[in-house]
Image: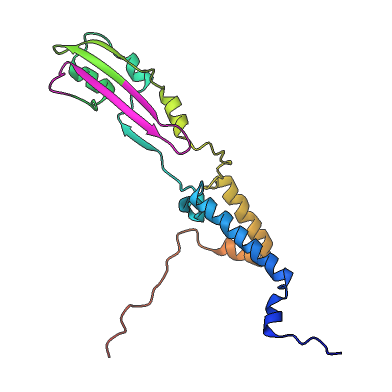
Amino acid sequence: MFDHIATPSTMSALPANPHYSIQKILIAVACGLLASCSSGTMSSSSINPVNWITPYKVDVIQGNFVSREQVEQLQAGMTRDQVKAVLGTPLLTSLFHADRWDYVFTLKRQGVEPQAFKYTVFFKGDKLERFAGDSMPSEAEFISTLSNKRVLGKVPVLQATEEQLKAAEKSSVSRAGPGAQADAANLPAGPLTTVYPPLESPRQ
């Protein structure tokens, strides 16, 4: 009886290693999922880790801030100069609408919707006739919106009082011993003079 000898034709008919075939199938499925994600909802900008970090943006204030206290000072009959002294220089003036001044300012903060305020004053000739606009925030409210909400600790005292200086001097002398106390008592009361060597050596 002859044993069956494997030939190239019979070897090609043998099934491949199932471990490697499953691995290839998993790799193909993973590549397909990545391709569908990249072409679908996910973009290169969303995948980039740099875009995950939100940079800090400073508060941006544009225009002239007009507070509630300033608006309360307006009175009909005021001159243009008086209105400008109270509200400041208007942001918008037009040659075609010389009888009105528009005060507009916007506030942009990180993580907060932009806020816009507008107030308009109307003149008749050189006199203030009427004024209207948004409900303006008070100065305290405006400052509170600019604060960073951080609670700071108590500020340490940076300057010592005379009593603290005397107590520190007594404690340092008592630690040095009786000899140092006697030397400190023998020191002259006047200011000490310091002798410095000459800057140039004497000529020979």
Farthest residue toward the front?
1
Please tell me whether residue 200 is drawn above or below residue 2 in the rendered image. above
Q: Is residue 106 magenta?
A: yes
Q: Give how far across and how far down residue 71 sits, in percent.
A: 33, 17
Q: Is residue 21 magenta?
A: no
- Residue nearer the viewer, 15 or 92: 15
Name which residue lies at 51% across and 53% down.
38
**What range of the chain is rendered magenta?**
94-118
Horizontally, residue 130 falls left or right of residue 147, namely: left
Quarter of the image for residue 26 reads bottom right
Horizontally, residue 159 falls left or right of residue 118, namely: right
- Report the quarter where the N terminus lies: bottom right
Q: Give how far across and how far down residue 177 sits, in percent.
A: 68, 64
Asked if one can make out residue 53 in the rendered structure from this viewpoint, the answer is: no
Q: How many marks?
A: 0
Q: Give how far across and how far down residue 135 sits, in percent.
A: 39, 17
Quarter of the image for residue 57 reads top left
Name which residue lies at 59% across and 48% down.
164
Farthest residue toward the right?
1
- Report the quarter where the C terminus lies: bottom left
Please tell me whether residue 32 is drawn above or below residue 203 in the rendered image. above
- Residue nearer the viewer, 148 or 20: 20
Q: Give how far across and how far down residue 128 sits, in percent.
A: 21, 12
- Residue nearer the viewer, 150 or 3: 3
Name which residue lies at 66% across and 64% down.
176
Horizontally, residue 165 falls left or right of residue 192, namely: right
Name which residue lies at 72% across and 72% down.
15
Please tell me whether residue 199 is drawn above or below residue 144 in the rendered image. below
